[in-house]
Image (cartoon, rainbow, N blue to C red):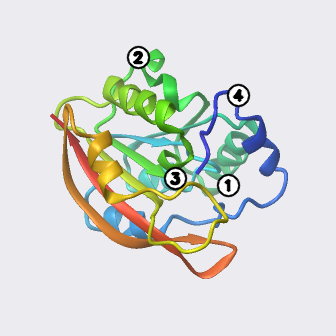
Amino acid sequence: MSGGPPGGGDFDAMYGGSPPWDIGRPQPAFLELAEAGALRGRVLDAGCGTGEHALMAARLGLDATGIDSAPTAIGIAERKAGERGLEARFLVWDALDLGSLEERFDTVLDSGLFHVFDDDDRARYVDSLRSAIPTAGRYFMLCFSDRQPGIWGPRRVTEDEIRASFAMGWRVETIDATTMDVTLEQDGVAAWRAQVTRT
């Protein structure tokens, strides 16, 4: 989770410590997808943070790229790849400008990025995804859910907001209620896991 606002200054500073979303392993909701064989082709981890999901894809033998606006997080991800003997590419990049990569990805993973955007940037992000995902490519998102009580943490997302964001040029396959692991809550937080296909 990160990728955040262009420039990523606030997010980068957080990687000087231990951000609550940086759990040091893949999110169980995404690990389940990997173990089920749902990841395929070229994989992009958008807002990769310290790289756990890109490294999960690399461990499966997939061509894996992680992008994040936080240079500190990218440095940590590169170090992890070296320590684990995994081949993955990590780039400091703005998730709102994936078109400038001039690459296409069969699978895009997003753990905790979608929910950091305001309405305008959310629309820009979906356009950005459109430029990077070919027809029949798939986007998997894990985001904070409106079922999560309290006001701390990022903006809550409703199921209807997900469907509205991907109403044109996409097919929403599933939106499942699940949890997202964080360091601040032993049982995790309420989340949505969505699978969306580019049409």
Q: Is residue 191 above or below residue 10?
A: below
Real-space CA distance between mark 1 and mark 4, rounded to the nearest whole angstrom: 28 Å
The residue labelled by disc 3 is 55
- Dot label at residue 102: 2
Most foreground residue, 159 or 47:
159
Real-space CA distance between mark 4 and mark 2, rounded to the nearest whole angstrom: 20 Å
The residue labelled by disc 4 is 7
Real-space CA distance between mark 2 and mark 3, rounded to the nearest whole angstrom: 22 Å
Q: Position of residue 187 (x, y in %)?
A: 56, 83
Most foreground residue, 58 or 175:
175
The numbered mark, 2 or 3, whose residue comes first in the sequence reads 3
The numbered mark, 4 or 2, whose residue comes first in the sequence reads 4
The residue labelled by disc 1 is 83
- Residue occupying the point 44% across, 56% down: 157
Neighbour tally class for label 2: few under 14, some 14-19, many 20 plus, Cα within 10 Å = few
Q: Position of residue 142 (x, y in %)?
A: 43, 58
The numbered mark, 1 or 2, whose residue comes first in the sequence reads 1
Circle 1 or circle 4, nearest the eye: 4
Real-space CA distance between mark 4 and mark 3, rounded to the nearest whole angstrom: 24 Å
For label 1, the SS is: helix
Circle 2 or circle 3, nearest the eye: 2
**Contact, mark 2 vs mark 3 (Cβ under 8 Å):** no
For label 4, the SS is: loop
- For badge 4, the amino acid type reads Gly
